Image: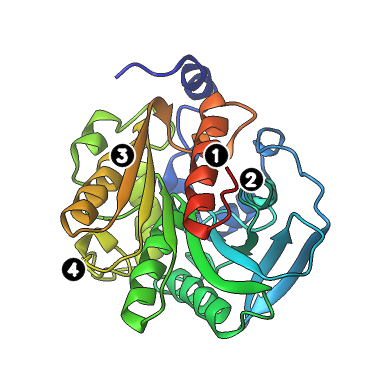
Amino acid sequence: MPLHPQAQDFVALYPSDLGTDPATLDLARIQEMRATDGLAAHRGPLTHLPFVRDESAEGVPIRVYRADRGEGALPVLVYFHGGGWVFGSVKRNDAVGRDLAVRTGAVVVSVDYRLAPEHPFPAAADDAWTVVRDVFARPAFYQCDGTVAVIGDSAGGNLAAVAAWQARDAGLTLAHQALVYPVLDVAMDTPSYSEFATGFGLDAKEMAWFAQRYSAGADPADPRLSPLRLPSVEGLPPATIVTAGCDVLRDEGERYAVRLERAGVPVEVRRYDGAVHSFFGLPGLFDQAIEARAYLAGRLRGALGLDTA
């Protein structure tokens, strides 16, 4: 599959995600890398919103966004950022949170879950579930009308998928799960892992490093780590899955869509041909990011009852 011209330009500048041999990264270097963001200028504008506040959900830091000036209840969209469970934050992904609020019209709750290796599995999954559970438990606090959906990209897509099945098992009904090139199986044995192992942004070796930092020896078949290994996906919320055509994670996202469809779960999957991992978060570099955000926003508005078209 040929790379999109913009993806070609990107990997010429950033041939790998970490930009260094993962084996050389100790905790001090990881923390140093978290403090800088060389791609900040490409993450999109920090759109002014009338309502942005930092709060806490049972001890988990969150940032809440609302794009309108009203005080009435709205659906809530819980967002989990990417970064391999090691990098990323609400602050780094502030532009995404704001953009989602504008595009969907929902209250967006962005989650600052704990990061590995300081906080290994299942810390991030526990934080994700804590926030989703809290939205259901305290709807008035979030100005929530009782309709809740989740969205996440990369490792955040993993957390969204895990929270979705935990909600199902707890008897809580999510309106939708939107998974953007999600990590769904740390076995890393799909054809896309071989096809795009090096030179396409996120290397297979780097993805293994991320998974090892987070899993810390946990059973790779644990569905809190690998939701593709869930014994049953029946009854999960309707889903939208976005994949990048030239991404090691492509196949597991599309396999998950097949499992959902076979179980009778409404699902739509869209592959962005020629795209590389991380494109969704960089609208300043990728036209496909803008296309994918518009597509997902439309899907979410429909699922949340906010589509006025």
Amino acid type, label 4: Ser
Q: CA distance from mark 1 to mark 4?
A: 29 Å
**Residue 279 percent coordinates (x, y):** 50, 34
Foreground tag (2 vs 4): 2
- Nearer the N terminus, badge 2 or badge 3? 2
Quarter of the picture holding the C terminus: top right
For label 4, the crowd category at 10 Å Cα-Cα, with few meaning under 14, some 14 to 19 and many 20 or more, is few
Q: Which amino acid type is marked by label 1?
A: Arg
Marks 2 and 4, how far apart at CA? 33 Å
**Number of residues whose C-alpha sits closer than 10 Å to that of mark 1, classed few (under 14), some (14–19) or many (20 or more):** some
Please tell me how crowded label 3 is: few (under 14), some (14-19), or many (20+) other residues with Cα within 10 Å: many
Mark 1–mark 2 distance (CA, rounded to whole Å)? 8 Å
Give the residue type at disc 3: Arg
Q: Which residue is mark 1?
A: 293
From the image, tell me which residue sits under label 4: 232
Neighbour class for label 2 at 10 Å: few (<14), some, many (≥20)?
some
Is residue 173 among the parts visible in the rendering? yes
Distance between the alpha carbons at the discs numbered 2 and 3: 25 Å
Q: Position of residue 234 (x, y in %)?
A: 22, 67
Q: Nearer the viewer, residue 123 or 229?
A: 229
Indicate the position of residue 159 as horizontal and vertical percent values: 43, 63
Look at the numbered disc 4 and give the secondary structure of its residue: loop
Q: Secondary structure at mark 1?
A: helix
User: In the displayed structure, would residue 93 be above or below residue 134?
Assistant: above
Q: Which residue is mark 2?
A: 103
Label 3 near label 4: C-beta < 8 Å?
no
